[in-house]
Image (cartoon, coloured by chain):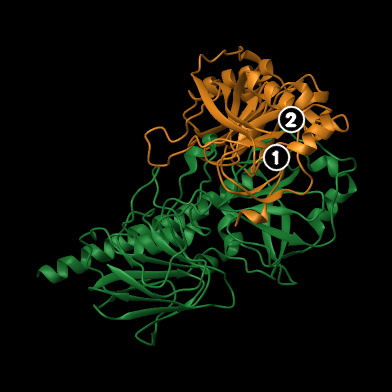
Chain colours: A green, B orange
């Protein structure tokens, strides 16, 4: 059991979501940065999709009621009883110790995994908080001061400390940086792209600012508006996170983890699934530029990320086994 | 936060005022496009009607046999197919989808019939006056046309368990509002373009409310969370009429 002793207003329990109910109108939810979630879980010996705390408003402070393995990933600077922790690191918190997460300048969201995972009830195959449906997580709501979160049974791994090289560093060759500091996000043209005429090129060429009206549902982008050459009427269609839609204002919306399941705005592009976690870490006020990509590049990125995750999984298991053997001697 | 995206979940009948320009309807072939690298959207050519939707159901049925798909999301005469992994050859995927569409025969789903008791008029019927104005009908006539209709669930979407109901009498078609109501109550019986439905969440809503129902449409803890399924028949029963 852990106890939330202080939290910002927008923090939730998330896992990899409940993606298979879009056909009955249920938002998939799930972590905005699923890669950070997976790594945090693997570091504490969980299945990669166990439920964790997603922190997007800081500070978050929690107290361990008993000794608990935990890992903090994503963007934050964390302390345990005031002692700074290394980023992307697993450690054991003792009973009574306090973990504090403060914001970091470079990324928007942090993940705290606990050995055994956060054991809130599974609703429709997932423990993720569905804010829109008001179910999942802790009663379908944001975490509050005083919440006590039950944990599942930890695996037998007896690691005490372990860290990884963060994916942005380990995979840096796959994630180019723009000279002007814009986040470069790869995307493919979507159904109505060509109906934007010359504006379509302006969509790709300019850097968009992530407006303050952005959250887990979607990011509203500010910039020079883009509009179809003539107004387009759409029939409602199924949507997934990463779809870039253009409402009549001409300023695009990128749907994110809490995306609605259906939409009717024309769509100009769709972000590669392999780049969604990076967009999930983009902060309000920062700039993003979309880069036209291909299925071949998408597969290369998928592969690179899978290799990284496998590497972390194998290393964590190997270290766990080695420590167990040593302890048994 | 739902305020962020009160987007048209079906703007096809904002097309009431002007003829819709629906890209796929201008072609004879299905239109296939991508959303990201793993999702493919097939849009049926032709009108927004029951025959087209029946063929979408047939396509959905056929695609359930494809192991490489993680999810199928039928929309309004369109269908989103989501792959588990990024396909190597997107052109080949599009060709396969097109073949499946060409071979899809209309399915007439033998769905169940759902009866929904409605309190027509009253405090929740916030758009009734506007609908009477637009249609030139009395409120009593509006209610009658609405509850005498037999509706087909075209698809679910937009909110948990929300069914898009097709079969509304053209005399009470009503475009979505350009400025959505910010806090329409769950249970409002609404008209959006040529469709009707019952709001399942309290929140922003651009459809026009003419009454209220307290039937619970969705229960996340139930074995079958949504009451409605595509192909079901829906009838509205006037439990109370408040003029």
> Where is mark 2, residue-wise?
B139
In percent of width and height, residue A137 lies at: 41, 56
Could you tell whether A270 is left or right of A93 in the image?
right
Compare residues B184 and A319 and report the one nearer the observer. Answer: B184
Residue at the location (31% across, 57% down)? A119
Residue at left 90%, top 40%?
A230
Between A88 and B12, which is closer to the camera in this rendering?
B12
Spatial distance from mark 2 to mark 1, Cα to Cα?
Answer: 17 Å
Q: Chain for mark 2?
A: B
Res A165 seen here: no
For this orientation, the residue located farthest to the left is A329
For label 1, the SS is loop
Q: Is residue B15 left or right of residue A6?
A: right
Residue B207 got which mark? 1
- B202 to A118, vertically: above or below: above
Q: Against A116, is B242 above or below?
A: above
């Amino acid at each position: 059991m852990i106890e939330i002793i202080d939290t910002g207003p927008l923090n939730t329990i998330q896992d990899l979501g409940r993606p298979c109910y879009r056909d009955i109108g249920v938002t998939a939810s799930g972590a905005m940065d699923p890669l950070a979630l997976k790594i945090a879980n693997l570091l504490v010996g969980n299945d990669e999709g166990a439920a964790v705390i997603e922190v997007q408003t800081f500070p978050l402070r929690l107290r361990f009621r008993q000794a608990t393995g935990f890992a903090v990933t994503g963007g934050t600077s964390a302390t345990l009883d005031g002692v700074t922790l290394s980023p992307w690191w697993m450690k054991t918190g003792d009973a009574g110790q306090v973990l504090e997460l403060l914001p970091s300048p470079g990324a928007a969201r942090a993940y705290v995994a606990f050995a055994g995972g956060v054991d809130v009830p599974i609703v429709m195959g997932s423990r993720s908080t569905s804010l829109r449906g008001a179910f999942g997580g802790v009663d379908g709501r944001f975490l509050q001061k005083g919440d006590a979160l039950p944990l599942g049974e930890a695996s037998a791994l007896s690691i005490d400390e372990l860290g990884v090289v963060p994916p942005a560093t380990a995979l840096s060759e796959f994630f180019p940086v723009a000279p002007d500091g814009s986040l470069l996000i790869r995307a493919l043209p979507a159904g109505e792209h060509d109906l934007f005429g010359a504006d379509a090129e302006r969509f790709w060429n300019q850097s968009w600012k992530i407006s303050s009206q952005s959250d887990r549902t979607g990011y509203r982008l500010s910039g020079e508006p883009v509009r179809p050459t003539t107004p387009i009427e759409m029939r409602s269609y199924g949507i997934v996170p990463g779809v870039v839609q253009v409402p009549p204002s001409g300023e695009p919306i990128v749907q994110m983890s809490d995306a609605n399941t259906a939409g009717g705005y024309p769509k100009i592009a769709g972000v590669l699934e392999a780049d969604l976690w990076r967009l999930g870490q983009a902060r309000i006020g920062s700039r993003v530029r979309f880069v036209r990509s291909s299925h071949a590049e998408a597969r290369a990125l998928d592969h690179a990320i899978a290799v990284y995750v496998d590497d972390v999984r194998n290393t964590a298991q190997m270290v766990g086994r080695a420590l167990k053997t040593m302890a048994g001697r | 936060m739902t305020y962020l995206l009160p987007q048209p979940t079906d703007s096809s009948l904002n097309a009431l005022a002007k003829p819709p320009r629906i890209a796929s309807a201008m072609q004879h072939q299905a239109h296939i496009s991508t959303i990201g690298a793993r999702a493919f959207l097939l849009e049926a050519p032709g009108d927004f009607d029951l025959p087209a939707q029946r063929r979408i159901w047939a396509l959905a049925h056929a695609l359930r046999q494809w192991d490489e798909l993680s999810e199928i999301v039928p929309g309004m005469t369109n269908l989103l197919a989501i792959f588990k992994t990024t396909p190597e050859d997107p052109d080949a995927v599009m060709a396969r989808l097109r073949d499946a569409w060409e071979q899809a025969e209309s399915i007439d789903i033998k769905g169940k019939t759902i009866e929904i008791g409605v309190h027509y008029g009253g405090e929740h019927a916030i758009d009734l006056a506007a609908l009477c104005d637009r249609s030139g009908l009395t409120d009593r006539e509006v209610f009658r046309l609405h509850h005498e209709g037999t509706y087909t669930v075209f698809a679910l979407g937009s909110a948990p368990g929300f069914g898009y109901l097709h079969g509304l009498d053209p005399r009470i078609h009503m475009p979505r509002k350009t400025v959505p109501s910010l806090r329409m109550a769950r249970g409002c019986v609404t008209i959006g373009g040529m469709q009707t439905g019952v709001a399942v969440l309290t929140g922003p809503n651009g459809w026009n409310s003419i009454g209220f129902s307290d039937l619970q449409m969705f229960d996340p803890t139930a074995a079958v969370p949504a009451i409605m399924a595509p192909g079901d028949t829906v009838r509205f029963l006037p439990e109370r009429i408040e003029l």
